[in-house]
Image: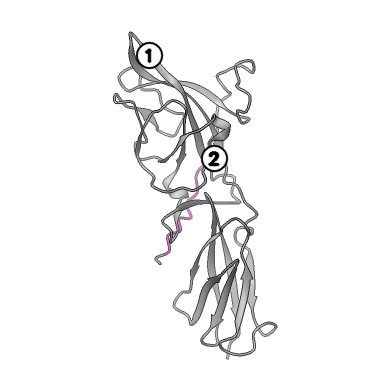
Amino acid sequence: MKKIFLPLFLAAIVWGAPSCSDDDKVPGDPDGTVALNMMDEGNGKTLLDDSGIYIDKAQNFVTGGRCVLFTLGKVGGLGAVTPKSLETGTSAAAVEAGHGYVAVRPAALMSFPSGKQAMPIGNRDVNYLKIYVVSPLTAEDKTVGAAVKYVAAVPESYKLPEYGSTVLTIDDSNYHELGQKVTLSLPAGEAEYDFIDDGYGISCERDGGKLVFRLDDWFAHKFELYLRIRESYTKVYVDVNVPL
């Protein structure tokens, strides 16, 4: 697979104070929730903070190319906006009351063999928006926008290994002959992997909850291994040091 890794992380988004009072805050809203009346492009064109997202005249969220939008369907509120996975991103989506959405900067996304995408863990500058449509806004029996709630969030770690860490070393201590297998346990949570072999004689395949590595030659090299759970991924290393 062609490696798709974008090291350009998001600049931190600084959110203003919520526009609703504590008395108006619906139980279950995450800390930092902002309530916003978004007028469509024909009635003022309210932008969703600095994301560039607005509502067009046809009552669609439009990203303007600055974000990728993922629709989550009907949810119980902003607190229930949780991306189980990120796939089929779009630049425009219908504004529907009671529905949740996730907006991510394109540079923060990596694609995996399954076609699902994910964001890197371990960097507070990489964040995304959770969005919930409360209700449409109307004037003279015409829809002119929507009342929304949104909050900035960072990718969950899901007990993935620390980003940039070495998770497996193959050397004289655990490798003695070509064809020998060395295993690495995967984190729980249906982890997906992408191993970058760099053209060396090393194979990697999944066996249940483990990855199995085997060398077809003697060499020393450090390999990149990407692990994804839901919307989050980490980049770690497999260090091979068995030169002839």
Secondary structure category for the residue under label 1: strand
Magenta part of the chain:
3-13
Q: Position of residue 212 (x, y in %)?
A: 57, 75
Q: Residue at x 51, y 33 (%)?
A: 75
Nearest to the observer: residue 119 or residue 190? 190
Q: Which residue is mark 1?
A: 138
Q: Position of residue 101 (x, y in %)?
A: 46, 36
Say how the picture is coloured.
one colour
Residue furthest toward the top?
A: 140
Question: Tag 2 or tag 1, which sits nearer the N-term?
Answer: 2
Residue 188 lies in the magenta-colored region: no
Q: Residue at x 56, y 34 (%)?
A: 80
Figure quadrant of residue 162: bottom right
Residue 11 lies in the magenta-colored region: yes
Q: Which mark is residue 82?
A: 2
Q: Is residue 217 above or below residue 197?
A: below
Q: Residue at x 41, y 56 (%)?
A: 115
Total labels: the figure holds: 2
Main SS of the magenta segment? loop
Figure quadrant of residue 188: bottom right
Q: Quadrant of the C terminus?
A: bottom right
Give the residue type that dot 2 points to. Thr
Q: Is residue 107 above or below residue 188?
A: above
